[in-house]
Image (cartoon, rainbow, N blue to C red):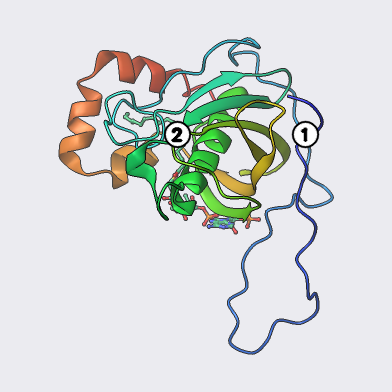
């Protein structure tokens, strides 16, 4: 994909928030954030990242209405992903639902954590919708890590319609928080956790995360 992933500009209307306003955390890394090296265990550039969970709405191959998004490791701290909009993903007639597109960005940004070899969950996600995305369109997403500060991982992505050089339809920035695998076992619905723990392949993929950076 050509060119860097562009970070959206700082929010408009700076200054003190109005009384009663909800103050959200920034998704732009602080000045003392670092861009760490790719983890030695990270999949090689060009390697498919696979699904982290078969029933994931974003990447699970066994989720019939899901996005079934597939991601590939890029160079450095970058990934690319593809997602075909299905009729079941419509918002307006013949157009992708914005929440579905946001999910595609969330999922792609989440796969970046493979490159740091750590599980992490979305703390905050911002999206700019630049042009409508037709049903049946293929979205090409390019994402990169922009900084790490303690357990906080900052990232940015952009999605283009029809090909890696197609028109930009969506931009996103996110803040992920590193967690341990117990995050999932502690909070997940017990029957699903049991099923996941009984799945030797999933367990192997998850355990691959357990040596943290
Ligand atoms: C064994 C079977 C397991 C099977 C699992 C299978 C695979 C697992 C492996 C990998 C999968 C990984 C990812 C999946 C990939 C993509 C899917 C898309 C991603 C998602 O769809 S994921 C769902 C949505 N996501 C949530 O469900 C999060 C809900 N939430 C919480 O679970 C907690 O809230 C948590 C853990 C986030 C933090 O809690 P905590 O107690 O650990 O940490 P704490 O509060 O101390 O925060 C530490 C520092 O982060 C800052 N901070 C915290 N939260 C923030 C926020 N929201 N915004 C801005 N900053 C935040 C603090 O301000 C502090 O900053 P500072 O250090 O500067 O003070």
* Residue tagged 2: 136
At 58% across and 13% down in the image, what residue appears?
43
Q: Position of residue 86 (x, y in %)?
A: 38, 36
Judge whether 174 appears above or below 62 on screen: below
Q: Earlier in the sequence, mark 2 or mark 1?
A: 1
Is 133 situated left or right of 159 in this image? left
Q: Position of residue 166 (x, y in %)?
A: 69, 32
Q: Is mark 1 within 8 Å of ligand 1?
A: no
At 57% across and 10% down in the image, what residue appears?
47
Q: Position of residue 207 (x, y in %)?
A: 40, 20
Dot 1: few (<14), some (14–19), or many (≥20) neighbours within 10 Å?
A: some
Which tag is nearer the camera, tag 2 or tag 1?
Answer: 2
* Residue tagged 1: 35
Is 137 situated left or right of 196 in this image? right
Q: Is residue 154 visible?
A: no
Q: Element under label 2?
A: loop
Judge whether 125 appears above or below 156 on screen: below
Asked which quadrant contains residue 4, the reply is top right
């Amino acid at each position: 994909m050509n060119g860097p992933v562009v970070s959206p500009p700082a929010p408009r209307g700076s200054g003190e928030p109005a009384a009663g306003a909800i103050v959200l955390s920034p998704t732009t890394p602080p000045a003392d954030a670092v861009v760490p090296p790719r983890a030695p265990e990270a999949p090689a550039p060009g390697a498919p990242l696979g699904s982290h969970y078969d029933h994931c709405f974003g990447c699970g191959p066994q989720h019939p209405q899901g996005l079934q998004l597939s991601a590939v490791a890029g160079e450095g701290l970058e990934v690319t992903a593809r997602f075909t909009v299905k009729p079941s993903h419509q918002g307006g007639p013949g157009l992708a639902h914005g929440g579905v597109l946001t999910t595609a960005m969330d999922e792609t940004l989440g796969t970046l954590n493979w490159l740091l070899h750590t599980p992490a969950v979305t703390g905050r996600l911002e999206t700019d919708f630049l042009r409508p995305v037709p049903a049946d369109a293929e979205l090409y997403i390019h994402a990169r890590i922009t900084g790490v500060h303690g357990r906080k991982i900052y990232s940015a992505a952009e999605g283009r319609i029809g090909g890696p050089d197609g028109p930009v339809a969506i931009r996103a920035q996110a803040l992920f928080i590193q967690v341990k695998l117990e995050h999932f076992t502690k909070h997940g619905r017990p029957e699903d956790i049991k099923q996941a723990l009984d799945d030797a392949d999933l367990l192997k993929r998850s355990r691959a995360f357990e040596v943290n950076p």
